[in-house]
Every structure is written in structure tokens, then in C-alpha cells.
Amino acid sequence: MSEATWWYRGGEGTSKHDLHYRREAEVNTTLEELLLYFIFLINLCILTFGMVNPHMYYLNKVMSSLFVDTSLPDDERSSFRSIRSITEFWKFMEGPLIDGLYWDSWYGNKQLYSVKNSSRIYYENVLLGIPRVRQLRVRNNTCKVYPAFQSLVSDCYSKYTVENEDFSDFGLKRNPEWTHTPSSRTAPWHWGFVGVYRDGGYIVTLSKSKSETKAKFVDLRLNNWISRGTRAVFIDFSLYNANVNLFCIIRSNFRIRTSNFHGKYKSLALCVCVCEFCFTIPRVILILGFPRMPVDQKQLWEDVLCSEEQQAVLSITDLPLNPGHGN
């Protein structure tokens, strides 16, 4: 009999009173630990959720609905979430973004506030400072082109990295939005789904006037401020709501992906090679061991391969004909 079992039954010379006392001690210890755990859990919940104001969620939801879920002009099914082209990007900039940033009059075209160039989003949220738009670009010829196609490809823009970032001026170089602004060493970087982006770039400072901002957007669009070298565009502004005493910092970003599949494959080359190797091993073993298999196993594998081939042929021959070419 093991020592643990002997102790549980009390062993030789242990009375029933001692055994009952030990069981009560175990139950009391378990209840004390459970009580301490619940006290710790309640304390943790209070510390975690006590710092959260319920108005934070509603303010965030309202701003998200205004700038993210509002449909684009002339297309009720498209919004910020469904932007897929530069044309749709400029529709958002000249439509929902401007209309959401500048609230300077009531529905009857009456001036909202006597303060000049003031904006109250939803009539309650004060726009702090001036919004800005900035983009990050990459240099030309930053991706590898195979020698056989170098004569056919003159422009090649790779994905965004610090090494590939473009610092040169472009377009209308006389204006500040066409010149590069260096990044501050203490400025935080932006972590996105596609990459990590630094501060700085080509910055457009918007005006407090709605008409001036719209005219600036039109000028940038006509002069191709967004081009093939653009990899990310950021829209930054902040608000203050005095009713709930909360600040709201908003950053909308657009990431333009590159079609450089070679660079993506290169970063995952080791993983892909390992998967291909593991995929190939069973087939090599099957080919090498096939001659030494018993007759019944060979027949089984032949039936499996023939059935897969027949299914492939049926899937091709059963395709429906194009009605437009039928009789």
C-alpha cells in the first residue's frame, strides 16, 4: 500500500476523531483559498473597469459612424471601409471627411457660432487645432526585377521600409505639401497590418475654412499627389467634448499595397520551403516503396488514384455551357 493511501486512511493508530479533524481542515483551507480568489478577482475587475468611462464607447462609436460608415458621394454602398482605389480615396476626402470636419452652420444655413473659423462636430465636439494629412512614399527602382524583364519594366516600387522610403521632393516642389518633412527621433511609429510606419513624410495642413480645404484637395488630386510611390496616407485630428469631459484623438490611415509578390515570398521563403519539403516526403516514400508493396495494397492505391483521376475528369466535363453561346 502506498504512503499516500495509508495517510488518507489514517494509518495504524489513527483515531476516527483525528481523521474527521483532518478532513475539516482540508475543507476549511479550500474555502479560505476560494474566498481569497474571489476577493482578488473582484479587486481586479474594479481596477480594470473602474478607469473606463461608459461615454468613451459612445463617443468613439459616433465618430466612427460619422467618418467611417458614411457612404461616398454617388455611391451609397461604398464607404471608408470599402475604399479600393485612388478615385474612391479622393471621393472620401472631398465628401465625408470635409462634411464631417466642418460644422459651421445650422440646417437653416444660419451661422452656428460667432467665433470665426470655428468648427463644432455634431454641434458639441470642438475641433482642436488644424487637421493634417500626410503620406509616406517609397523610391523608384527599390524592388528586384529579373534580368529578362528589365528592358520592359522602367518603374518598380517595392513595399514600405525605412530603407526604401523616399525623402526627395516631387510634383509641385514650391509648395510645402510636395516637400519631405523629416521624422522626429522621439515621435512614435505607427504599427499597421501591412507594415510599420515612421513619422514625418509629405504633410498637408488643412485650413479652418471648408471651402479652402476643399480647393486644396482638388488641387492635390489634379496634380497627382497620390501616385504609384505612395504607400500610406494618414489623417490626424483631435476633438474635445465638454459635456462628458473627454478628448478623442482620431487617426484614419490608408495603406496602399504593392504587387511585389517576390518580396513577400522572400520573407516567408524558409517557411514555404519547409512546408514543401514536408509535403513531398510522403510522396517520395510512396514512390520508393510502391514496388515492394503487396499485391492487394498496390491494387488499393491504383483504385484510389484512378478514382481521383475520374473525379478530376468529371469536374471538367460537367462544367455548364455558356448560355450566350448556346443554340
Image: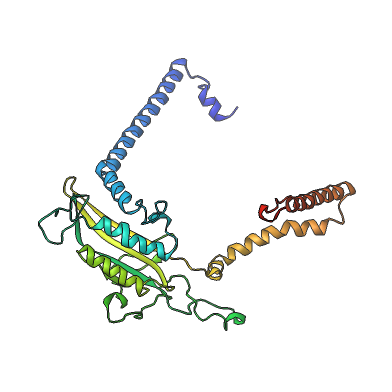
Residue pictured at 12% horizontal, 54% vertical:
113
Q: Quadrant of residue 208 in the image?
A: bottom left
Q: Where does residue 308 sit, x and y in percent of width and height?
A: 77, 50
Q: Where does residue 148 sit, x and y in percent of width and height?
A: 62, 81
Q: Where does residue 7 sit, x and y in percent of width and height?
A: 51, 26
Farthest top residue in view: 16
Residue pictured at 28% horizontal, 62% vertical:
236
Count the marks.
0
| Closer-to-camera residue (102/191) | 102
Is 138 rendered above or below residue 314? below
Is 192 rendered above or below residue 51? below
| Closer-to-camera residue (36/302) | 302
Farthest right residue in view: 295
Farthest bottom residue in view: 151
Q: Is residue 136 visible?
A: yes
Residue pictured at 88% horizontal, 46% vertical:
296
Farthest front residue in view: 327
User: If the image is split into quadrants, where does the N terminus sit?
Assistant: top right
Is 182 rendered above or below residue 287? below
Q: Is residue 190 visible?
A: no
Q: How is the image coloured?
A: rainbow
Q: Where does residue 313 sit, x and y in percent of width and height?
A: 77, 53
Is 129 rendered above or below residue 106? below
| Closer-to-camera residue (10/258) | 258
